[in-house]
Image: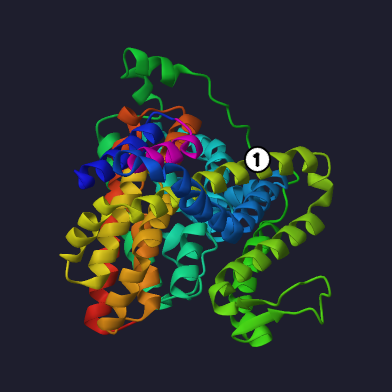
Amino acid sequence: MSFLIVLAALVFLMLAAYRGYSVILFAPIAALGAVLLTDPGAVAPVFSGIFMDKMVGFVKLYFPVFLLGAVFGKLIELSGFSEAIVVAAIKYIGRTRANAVIVLVCALLTYGGVSLFVVVFAVYPFAAELYRQSNIPKRLMPGAIALGAFSFTMDTLPGTPQIQNIIPTTFFKTTGWAAPWLGVIGSIATLAAGLAFLEWRRRSAMAKGEGYESAAAAITGGDAAVAAAPVPVPAPPHAGLPHPLLSLAPLVLVGIANFALTKLIPVWYGDSYALTADALPGLHAPVTLPIKAVVGIWAVEGALLLGILLTVATAFARIRLTFADGTKAAVGGALLAAMNTASEYGFGGVIAALPGFLSVSEALRSVPNPLVNAAVSVTALAGITGSASGGMSIALAAMSEQFMRAAEAAQIPLEVMHRVVAMASGGMDTLPHNGAVITLLAVTGLTHRQSYRDIFGITIIKTLAVFVVITVYYLTGLV
């Protein structure tokens, strides 16, 4: 019975997310409903002592990353830098390689620190124009955007500043550059297989005579109304765009600064830093901060801040009039994204405390290999919640100690565990109820029935890439 209570809570949260209800509201309802069925008297203490404690702790650690990433992405969009990068990619790679162009541009923006959701909105108008001119079926476009934005640059490439690569650092005391060789190998495997899959899908569709507008004509009923909804007609690239190298400069700076700060912060601060009354007379007691737990977070925050400053300095004339409204929208988006994930983290903390979760933990322990155990656990929870960061947060809140003990017993570096967990979070997360998938389809004016097959293909490739990396590690010992 206790296991069924945990399962019911997970299914309830999954259905709420799939139906579009707010996770901020329904995560505590799901968690406290499970507590009510287990021990009614514990509902209020669990809410204050576990759910809110975990939720606030997540916001304390990661909200600045969400905020700076959202502001940086919005400024890259408002400055015209994202548009200039797309135009340059089309010019130098060629319109005949539409999939490669879209994947490359999405990858550059994502790895450069731009939020995944911002990438979708920034790239879609140009992707639509490129596909239309190449007469490639529009329904294939979401798969290309998903490969570039939701896969290897989100959690696999070492140093990516996306939150999926940052969350494990606080649990495993690693950095965003953990297991660089495995990250590069996993990225190459994902990119190569993904592009081959997209090209196969394109050739198959075009061999049947399908063109850019063919998909809309094939839809009937309610789906036709969705497809017929007006979508913005992208204007041709206008004159006066920033130079591509200038547009890339903030993205490159974020990467370089992230790497440099990861190395320098431990040198500057040592293993820990103590705030005392000598420096801050208002303190009633010393505050000691373990530096190793926050190196990855501080490095990304500092890198994004430098990227923002460079963007403002080099594109002030372009963003001056829209800066206020743009940053307000970015802050709102960051708050929503951070609170969604924090609510799921609080949910995971509550579920981990229930007796029914012991059954889940025991079942997962039946998978003897520590890396496979971690990968299966994280990707399963990411799939259930429809969120890479949410599923990983739930898994790590509940099982990080178990993962670390198993890794230590098997003499597996925690850097490898970090990379496997991060990659697994971006595996089965992109099931139909995933928020990024729903947003992507809404922005492109397409439906699940039209385009989800291609997104799911990328999902399978990304999930398998995790096990490729695990295999490479055991065969070669590379980290």
- Determine the residue positioned at 41% across, 64% down: 156
Q: Where is residue 354 in the image (x, y as percent from the top left)?
A: 31, 52
270 magenta-colored: no
Q: Quick one: SS at disc 1? A: helix
383, 246: nearer the viewer: 383
Q: In which quarter of the image is residue 352?
A: bottom left
Return the residue nearer the eye: 15 or 247: 15
Q: Position of residue 230 (x, y in %)?
A: 53, 20
Q: Position of residue 228 (x, y in %)?
A: 45, 17
Image quarter (top left, top right, bottom left or bottom right) of the N terminus: top left
Q: Amino acid under label 1?
A: Gly
Query: In screen coordinates, is 369 left or right of 127?
Result: left
Q: What is the span of residues highlighted in magenta in the rendered image?
A: 21-35
Residue corresponding to mark 1: 332
Label 1 crowd bin: few (<14), some (14–19), many (20+), radius 10 Å = few
For the C terminus, give its image quadrant: bottom left
Residue situated in front as seen by the camera: 455 or 82: 455
- Residue drawn at the location 47% of the way across and 76% of the way down: 174
